[in-house]
Amino acid sequence: MPDQIELSRRRFIFPFFDKADFAGVPSQLVLRPRKNFEATIDRAVGEQVRADGACGVELWSALAGIHWHSADGAVVSYTSRQAADLVAWVREEGDSLIWYHSGPTGDVASWITAAMAKEGWTWSLATCS
């Protein structure tokens, strides 16, 4: 028996065989806050991070173990590996492993705090619950 899911009140059967299965089904936009945050990071601090590897380390530290909050209430956070991937993406490099645990977690440099605050983002330390 194929697996079934309900998406936007429509029932689908896996595997999908036809594009009509997706016709009229809008995106759930679950990744929109992350995409907005990443575009903001690139715009706000990207030049510094591309120009100086030490700034890349500071960016990794500002991502891992931190919750970033947008003015509209969205919250974005990154694992250590996801933070390394984002630093590599901002620096336009292929190898993210060099950024993995490259600095202390949960340490946001003042220049990153200020740049992101101008863009409407604030941060808090991630807590285990």
Image (cartoon, rainbow, N blue to C red):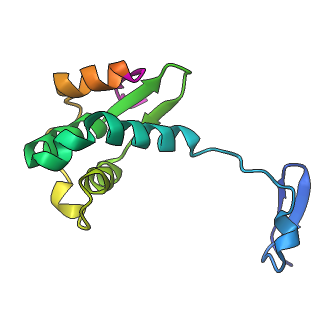
Instruction: Locate residue 44 relative to residue 50 in the image: left or right.
Output: right
Q: Residue at x 13, y 47 (%)?
A: 51
Q: Quadrant of the C terminus?
A: top left
Q: Quadrant of the N terminus?
A: bottom right
Q: Residue at x 88, y 70 (%)?
A: 20
Q: Is residue 6 visible?
A: yes
Q: Is residue 12 magenta?
A: no
Q: Which residues are magenta?
A: 119-129
Q: Which of the 4 image quadrants contains residue 21?
A: bottom right
Q: Which of the 4 image quadrants contains residue 92?
A: bottom left
Q: Residue at x 31, y 48 (%)?
A: 83
State the residue in front, 83 or 53. 53
Q: Is residue 127 magenta?
A: yes
Residue 110 x %, y %: 18, 22
Residue 108 x %, y %: 21, 28
Instruction: Locate residue 59 relative to residue 4 in the image: left or right.
Output: left
Residue 38 x %, y %: 41, 43
Instruction: Locate residue 107 relative to residue 52 in the image: left or right.
Output: right
Residue 91 x %, y %: 23, 54
